Structure formats: structure tokens, C-alpha cells
Image: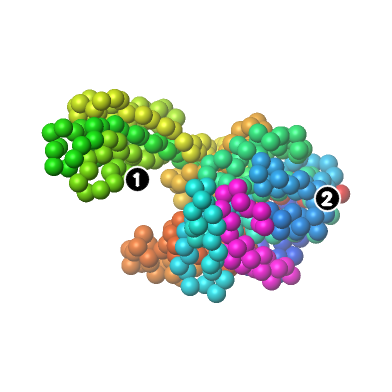
């Protein structure tokens, strides 16, 4: 996307600086597209982002950034100090998913990897993190090549293992705060299934918190022909699944938000054997800590009660894992950001409200003690989206993140993602230059 398509709509030093910096977008478009295709074609699982991190570090060094590698596991940070001014941190996540890509792209992934359980699995960037990495490198290049247009310090942070909810905390625990200058503000963005070219900031809770829970229920094993000798854990688990459906319907206020998803149920080994245990794995998402605590407590209460009703030999065991914090955008920061986006993108700025997906990004600014804002960018061909919207088939026809068919269009997705980072950073840097 050329700068003429997204020309600034307000005056001031910042708008002038944005114009000057984004003037370099056309010249680097081939480089940016090649970068993106490489990342898309060769995705890597959480904490295995070795080649991605190496390429990121090489690009940043070539641009003159001070680079620190292997933060946490494969995390990379590039710092570009450019005179007096605030320090702005921008984060991109690097990891992919154990998904077999089904996009038909000529640069589709055919790679496999070994997962944490030792299984060989297909790998794909089905969540769009390749867009995030390429966009941040694009913005890093534009800022490095136009240092006369701004003043301050830009921190480009590339995080591993977002999909495991561990990467941000691992970078923090590995001394991130001592490795970078203290930022004044932190940003992140995510490509989502709405029209490419659009940018969606939202103040307050934006992405839900998420907790996964593993419940092991215990029964008494027996022969399938002698059920009277058993306590059937599969029947018990099934009763729990049904009862859990009442939590959101009857224990959460209508104006609150909660999702309880039972993603896995496992028990038994053969049709004529009644097992002695079964396992349920479920996921809870909310926008309010008090609601989350209430839902998790209800899950435990119901599982224990159903076990007692089944005369189980012992109470269920509960394990919480994969905790994602609430992403709650700072009001003042997001207002300032939205004004900058609107000045540049005009009518392409649209607040699409809260998203029920979850992220671990906020662990970084929370640990650093700085305000943050996280926004969405569209990745769907606008004409395709408009046609589906007209037919009322968006949910059926537009693949969402984590789908094997999820495939953001290159443009205007990458140009918008790159420009959004520059615009956000310049809302703090201004255009004073050196």
C-alpha cells in the first residue's frame, strides 16, 4: 500500500514524520513480501523458533539495531537509540501451530516438527504470527532508514511461545527489564479475520483471559458385562460435561461474558472394559477476574458433586494450566493511539469491540510497569469479505485464525500492519528528529 493511499489527514510534526517515514514503503515491498513468504513457508512450533529468530536477528543487525538473542528460549530484541525522546516497545510473536495447512498457496507450509510429546506433526502459521514478524521488521527498517524524521528509542521485541502462553513470561523471567531501556509504552497487534486495510483499536478489555483445566475423575474398573461392580468414570465424565453447560446459562449474569469449552474427554481402552478413570480438558474465557474465579469454582463444585453422586472412590483431581492474562488496553494510551490511527487511516479505523481470543503479551508491560495497547488489523480480501457479509455467510465463508484455511492476503495486510506500527510509534516520538 503506497503512502498516497493512506495519506495523513491531520497536520503537525507527527503527521509530517509519518509521511516521510512511510515514503519508503514502496521501495521495500518486494523485500517485505519475500520475508513474509519465507516465514510462512517455514513455520516453527513454540520454543522452537530457531530459524525465525536467526533471520530476525540478522535483519535487525543489518539495520543497525543493538540485538540481544535467546531471551527466554528464542526471544530476540532489537534496540534502535535515536537521540532524546521516549522509548517505545513493539512486540511480535513468532510461533506457529501444529496444523496441516490447507490454503492452496504456492508458498504454503509443508514442514513438520516434533512436538513436546515426541510426535511428528505438521506445522503452519494458521494464526498469522508471520504477519506480525514481517510487519515489525518492516517498521523497524522504515524507522532505521528515516532517523532524521523522529527522535527517541525503538524497541522491537520478537517473542516465542505465545501459543503455549509461556513466551512472554519466559522473556520477563530471563531478565528482559535489564536488557532494554525502560519503555514509556508498549504495543502489540494481531491480524484477524476482518477486511484487510482496517485497523481496530479498542480501549479497556480487548482480549479475554483464558485458563485451561484438566480434570481427572476416578471410578472403579470392571468387566463390561458386570457394570454393577463398577463406578463408570465415562458416565461420570459425561454427566459433568452436561452439567457444566449450566454455568454460563445459569450462574453468569447476562451482561457478563464467559465461555466454557470442553475440548477433550478421554477414558477407557476397549469396548468391553469399564475403566477406572477418565480425563476432561476444558477452557474458560472471561473479561473479568471475578467472573473467572466464579466459573472455575463452579466447575470444581460440579465435578466434585457429580463424583459424589456417582459414589466415586475418590474426589476428582484438578490441574490448571496455560493461563492467559486479560488484555486490558490502557484508556489514555488507546485514546491517543486511536487519534493517531484516525489521522492516518481515516475511515479504515473501526472499533470491532472485544475479542474472545487470548494472549500473553500483557505479561510483558505488566512486568515492566508500563501502559499498553493492543489492536487488530484485518487480513481478509475486502471484496471477499464484503460478498460474504452481503450473503450473511461471514462465519461460514471466512476462515478464522487457527483454521487450516486461514491465509491473510499479502496486501494491504502487510502494508497496513507495517504502517500501523510506525504511526503508533510516531504518536509518542513526534517528529523532532536529531
Which residue is at 25% across, 25% downward? 313
The N terminus is located in which quarter?
bottom right
The image position of residue 297, as x and y in percent, is: 35, 27
Extreme-bottom residue of the structure: 106
The image position of residue 243, as x and y in percent, is: 23, 35
Mark sitting on residue 185? none
The image position of residue 173, as x and y in percent, is: 65, 33
Other-residue count near label 2 (Cα within 10 Å), few / some / many at <14 / 14–19 / ≥20? some
Q: Nearer the viewer, residue 413 or 212?
A: 212
- For the stretch drawn in magenta, the main secondary structure is helix
Whether residue 43 appears in magenta in the rendering, the answer is yes
Which residue is at 46% across, 51% downward? 352
Other-residue count near label 1 (Cα within 10 Å), few / some / many at <14 / 14–19 / ≥20? few
Q: Is residue 124 above or below residue 285?
A: below
The image position of residue 47, as x and y in percent, is: 60, 47
Q: Does dot 2 land on a helix, a strand or a loop?
A: loop
Whether residue 200 appears in magenta in the rendering, the answer is no
* Tally of marks: 2
Q: Quadrant of residue 43?
A: bottom right
Which residue is at 75% across, 58% downward? 59
Q: Does dot 1 land on a helix, a strand or a loop?
A: strand
Tell me where the magenta segment starts and ends, as one range: 27-52
Q: Is residue 66 above or below residue 366?
A: below
The residue identified by callout 1 is 264
Asked whether residue 369 is in view, the answer is yes
The residue identified by callout 2 is 433
Q: Which comes before the other along the chain, label 2 or label 1? A: 1
Q: Is residue 255 left or right of residue 375?
A: left
Q: Is residue 130 left or right of residue 219?
A: right
Which residue is at 33% across, 39% downward? 279
Amino acid at each position: 500500500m503506497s503512502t498516497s493511499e493512506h495519506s495523513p489527514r491531520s497536520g503537525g510534526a507527527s503527521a509530517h514524520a509519518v509521511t516521510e517515514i512511510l515514503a519508503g514503503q514502496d521501495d521495500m515491498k518486494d523485500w517485505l513480501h519475500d520475508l513474509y513468504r519465507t516465514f510462512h513457508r517455514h513455520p516453527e512450533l513454540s520454543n522452537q523458533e530457531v530459524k525465525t529468530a536467526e533471520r530476525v536477528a540478522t535483519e535487525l543487525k543489518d539495520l543497525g539495531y543493538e540485538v540481544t538473542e535467546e531471551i527466554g528460549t528464542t526471544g530476540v530484541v532489537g534496540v534502535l537509540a535515536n537521540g532524546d525522546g521516549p522509548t517505545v516497545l513493539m512486540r511480535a510473536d513468532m510461533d506457529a501451530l501444529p496444523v496441516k495447512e490447507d490454503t492452496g498457496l504456492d508458498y504454503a507450509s509443508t514442514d513438520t516438527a516434533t512436538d513436546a510429546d515426541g510426535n511428528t506433526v505438521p506445522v503452519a502459521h494458521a494464526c498469522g504470527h508471520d504477519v506480525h514478524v514481517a510487519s515489525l521488521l518492516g517498521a523497524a527498517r522504515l524507522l532505521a532508514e528515516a532517523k532524521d524524521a523522529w527522535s527517541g528509542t525503538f524497541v522491537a521485541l520478537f517473542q516465542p511461545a505465545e501459543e503455549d502462553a509461556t513466551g512472554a513470561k519466559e522473556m520477563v523471567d530471563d531478565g528482559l527489564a535489564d536488557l532494554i531501556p525502560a519503555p514509556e509504552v508498549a504495543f502489540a497487534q494481531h491480524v484477524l479475520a476482518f477486511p484487510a486495510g482496517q485497523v481496530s483499536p479498542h480501549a479497556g478489555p480487548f482480549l479475554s483471559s483464558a485458563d485451561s483445566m484438566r480434570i481427572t475423575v476416578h471410578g472403579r474398573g470392571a468387566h463390561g458385562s458386570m457394570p454393577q461392580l463398577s463406578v463408570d468414570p465415562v458416565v461420570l465424565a459425561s454427566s459433568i460435561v452436561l452439567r457444566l453447560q449450566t454455568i454460563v446459562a445459569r450462574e453468569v449474569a447476562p451482561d457478563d461474558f464467559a465461555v466454557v469449552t470442553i475440548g477433550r474427554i478421554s477414558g477407557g481402552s476397549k469396548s468391553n472394559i469399564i475403566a477406572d478413570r477418565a480425563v476432561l480438558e476444558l477452557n474458560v474465557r472471561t473479561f473479568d477476574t471475578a467472573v473467572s474465579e466464579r466459573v472455575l469454582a463452579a466447575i470444581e463444585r460440579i465435578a466434585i458433586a457429580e463424583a459424589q453422586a456417582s459414589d466415586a472412590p475418590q474426589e476428582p483431581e484438578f490441574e490448571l494450566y496455560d493461563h492467559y492474562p486479560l488484555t486490558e488496553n490502557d484508556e489514555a494510551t488507546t485514546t491517543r493511539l486511536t487519534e493517531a490511527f484516525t489521522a492516518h487511516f481515516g475511515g479504515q479505523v473501526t472499533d470491532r469491540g472485544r475479542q474472545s481470543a487470548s494472549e500473553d503479551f500483557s505479561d510483558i508491560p505488566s512486568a515492566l510497569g508500563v501502559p499498553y495497547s493492543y489492536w487488530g488489523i484485518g487480513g481478509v480480501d475486502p471484496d471477499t469479505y464484503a460478498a460474504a457479509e452481503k450473503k450473511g455467510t461471514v462465519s461460514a465463508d471466512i476462515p478464522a485464525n487457527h483454521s487450516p484455511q486461514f491465509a491473510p492476503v499479502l496486501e494491504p495486510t502487510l502494508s497496513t500492519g507495517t504502517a500501523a506500527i510506525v504511526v503508533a510509534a510516531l504518536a509518542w516520538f513526534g517528529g523532532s528528529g536529531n
